[in-house]
Image (tube, rainbow, N blue to C red):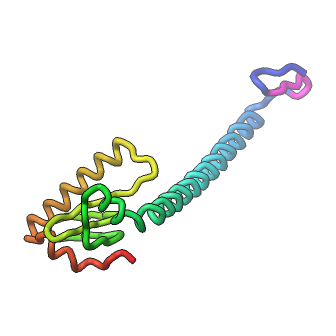
Amino acid sequence: METTQGFAIDPDDPPTFEKVWKMFRETREQIAATDRQMKETDRRVGELTNRFGDMVEHMVVPNLLEKFKTLGFVFEMASRDLKITDQKNNIFVEVDVFLQNGDKVMIVEIKATPSVKDITNHVKRMEKMRRYADLTGTPGNTWGLLPELS
């Protein structure tokens, strides 16, 4: 029995159209099954990445105010997971940590390994926050309505 590119060819049982077509169908089914497995793996890796991100946030946030204080930035209020949904002005923003001291605010995005894309997205996030504050006339000291970190 000779082989051609991994397929065994039996001279006593030559390939027929039906046999070749069956192999194509089986191959298509195997590819579909592999695709389903890859999607499930991607979903699980995504969940794991999100859990890792949550773990990093839980490690960083409790000491954030103190760390900034040692760097000369004093904030009286800190809020986690701030979400702004302004339908009227089409501004939608999510912030990991929002720090405030009077009319001064700092927006913190926590990443285990920040990429250039993460930094670009954060700059856009800050621009949206500035636009929201300007459009709504929200000075920094009125952000104090946010719940504090515990």
The residue nearer to you, when weighing 15 against 45, is 45
The residue nearer to you, when weighing 112 against 41, is 112
Image location of residue 105, percent across then percent down: 20, 64
Judge left or right: residue 7 versus residue 63: right
* Figure quadrant of residue 43: bottom right
Image location of residue 33, percent across then percent down: 66, 49
Quadrant where the C terminus lies?
bottom left
Tell me which residue sits at (91%, 25%) in the image: 12
The residue nearer to you, when weighing 127 against 21, is 127
* Figure quadrant of residue 65: bottom left
Tell me which residue sits at (22%, 56%) in the image: 126
> How many marks overall?
0
Tell me which residue sits at (80%, 29%) in the image: 15
Residue 62's place in the image compared with 38, above or below, is: below
Reply yes or no: does residue 57 show up in magenta. Answer: no
The residue nearer to you, when weighing 122 against 90, is 122
Residue 107's place in the image compared with 4, above or below, is: below
Image location of residue 58, percent across then percent down: 47, 66
Tell me which residue sits at (20%, 69%) in the image: 101
Image location of residue 40, percent across then percent down: 60, 55
Judge left or right: residue 102 versus residue 8: left
Quadrant where the N terminus lies?
top right
Question: Over which residues does the magenta segment extend?
Answer: 7-13
Judge left or right: residue 117 versus residue 55: left
Judge left or right: residue 84 versus residue 66: left
